[in-house]
């Protein structure tokens, strides 16, 4: 039976087929995401993968609502798999923000589900690092969140020659629209035209804009001007002081597809423009208010970084480490009458923190040794029977091929502890 289209199987390396994904690459990405988020003082949270449908129909926008994996459950509830994390976060923070000192700085690594047309960089399931700051309306917070996005990508070995943060402002676009169009109800319709501008046939965009009495040429001129607003300039100055200026450029071609953004917005792209967005985010100051029916309003901002495009990019740039799971010790059981005594030693090695492997069932000695080499073991361990009740404990360094002999398990462990782990 095949898996569903747009879903992935994650196998340990070496991968058996080009159509499957690496569980080890995935762990590497998650570990790096977590390490850098913690370094910036973010705390980890999580929420349910299923939510009430209404959480998304409120304010995520038509595009994502059209992609929902929604259904009616056995209790007649309208529910959906989460397509993004932000509404869940807003719901969680609105409910208990009083218990946390502001600004709240939280991250999460959820698996998200969108019923999209499957294409390069887009699947029906993906993982996303979400990092958000809640309860701070200063541009210092916008700069901090962008610096985190940059540093996460740098931690994978990517440089300013590999990627760029395209920084824009939803409020600049909202002012642009307000000055030219009196029908504010249609602002989101306008944002979606801008969001699709780069991918859409110019004639189609021109026509859509003219329906709003807007000029395509004027819009493209505004994008080309790239003049930072005072707010965006403050973010640029902040990032510049950190030595991160080379990673950012003002680009009003970005506006973000999701409906809830209110202020600075940004997307990370590879410099060659070969891949889809690696990450996207921005400020969304009204979402908690909307989700809590007006009870709380917490200025908020953050970003999501997906694992799919990131993996493709790291693979293309040759930046993925080689993965193997070497056993530190491989225990050889050449004489089956010593199996139980060997298991005692194996347990002691593992308790002491050494990854240890061995043949679960009787196996020829040469096959066991071959397995030790395959596993790139640092040591082989074996017991040798003696006439006396004590056995000899033998530890062989597979690099130097030198074998040490010990009279007891304690001595073997003591020796191991003097060796680099
Ligand atoms: P988003 O732009 O929809 O934002 O997604 C962020 C990133 O997730 C994208 O740049 C892309 O790398 C990845 N991604 C999205 N959809 C897919 C897909 N179908 N397949 C593979 N990767 C995908 C959000 O989701 C916002 N909630 C982010 C945010 C957090 N804004 C504020 N806080």
Image (spheres, grey):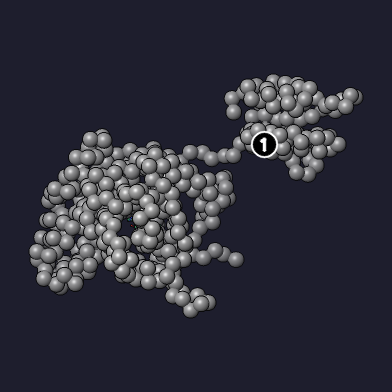
Residue that protrudes farthest toward the front in the picture = 98
Residue 159 visible somewhere in the drawing: yes
Front-most of residues 144 and 20 = 144
- The residue under the point 76% across, 22% down is 406
Q: Quadrant of the C terminus?
A: top right
The answer to whether 261 appears left or right of 14 in the picture is left
Q: Mark 1 = which residue?
A: 350
* Secondary element at tag 1: helix
Residue that protrudes farthest toward the bottom in the picture = 76
**Can you give x and y, in whole percent of width and height, for residue 7 in the image?**
49, 61
- The residue under the point 51% across, 65% down is 4
Badge 1 density bin: few <14, some 14–19, many ≥20, Cα 10 Å: some
**Residue 83 against residue 414 in the figure, above or below:** below
Q: Quadrant of the N terminus?
A: bottom right
Front-most of residues 136 and 340 = 136
Q: Is mark 1 within 8 Å of ligand 1?
A: no
Judged from the image, the quadrant occupied by ligand 1 is bottom left
- The residue under the point 18% across, 48% down is 232
The answer to whether 256 appears left or right of 83 in the picture is left
**Can you give x and y, in whole percent of width and height, for residue 280 in the image?**
31, 53
- The residue under the point 50% across, 75% down is 73
**Residue 339 against residue 251 in the figure, above or below:** above
């Amino acid at each position: 039976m095949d898996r569903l289209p747009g879903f992935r199987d994650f196998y340990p390396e070496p991968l058996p087929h080009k159509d499957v994904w690496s569980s080890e690459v995935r762990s590497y990405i998650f570990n790096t995401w977590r390490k850098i988020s913690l370094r910036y003082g973010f705390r980890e949270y999580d929420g349910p993968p299923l939510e009430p449908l209404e959480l998304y129909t409120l304010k995520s926008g038509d595009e994502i609502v059209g992609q929902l994996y929604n259904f009616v459950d056995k209790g007649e509830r309208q529910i959906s798999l989460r397509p993004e994390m932000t509404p869940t976060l807003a719901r969680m923070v609105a409910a208990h923000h009083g218990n946390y000192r502001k600004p709240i700085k939280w991250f999460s690594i959820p698996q998200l589900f969108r019923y999209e047309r499957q294409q390069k960089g887009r699947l029906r399931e993906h993982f996303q690092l979400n990092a958000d700051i809640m309860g701070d309306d200063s541009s210092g917070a916008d700069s901090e969140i962008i610096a985190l996005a940059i540093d996460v990508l740098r931690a994978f070995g990517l440089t300013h020659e590999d990627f760029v943060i395209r920084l824009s402002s939803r409020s600049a676009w909202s002012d642009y629209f307000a000055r030219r169009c009196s029908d504010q109800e249609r602002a989101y319709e306008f944002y979606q035209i801008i969001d699709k501008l780069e991918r859409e046939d110019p004639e189609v965009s021109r026509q859509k804009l003219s329906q709003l009495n807007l000029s395509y040429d004027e819009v493209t001129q505004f994008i080309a001007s790239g003049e930072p607003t005072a707010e965006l300039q403050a973010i640029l100055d902040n990032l510049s002081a950190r030595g991160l200026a080379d990673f950012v450029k003002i680009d009003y071609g970005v506006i973000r597809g999701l409906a809830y953004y209110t202020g600075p917005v940004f997307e990370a792209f590879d410099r060659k423009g070969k891949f889809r967005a690696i990450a996207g985010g921005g400020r969304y100051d009204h979402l908690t208010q909307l989700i809590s029916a007006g009870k709380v309003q917490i200025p908020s901002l953050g970003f999501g970084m997906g694992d799919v495009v990131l993996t493709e990019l790291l693979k293309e740039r040759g930046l993925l480490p080689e993965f193997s799971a070497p056993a530190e010790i491989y225990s050889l059981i050449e004489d089956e009458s010593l199996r139980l005594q060997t298991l005692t030693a194996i347990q002691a090695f593992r308790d002491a923190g050494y990854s240890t492997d061995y043949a679960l069932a009787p196996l020829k000695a040469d096959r066991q040794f071959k397995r030790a080499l395959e596993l790139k073991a640092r040591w082989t361990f074996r017991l040798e029977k003696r006439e006396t009740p004590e056995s000899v404990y033998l530890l062989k360094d597979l690099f130097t091929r030198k074998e040490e002999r010990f009279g007891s398990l304690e001595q073997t462990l003591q020796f191991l502890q003097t060796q680099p782990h």
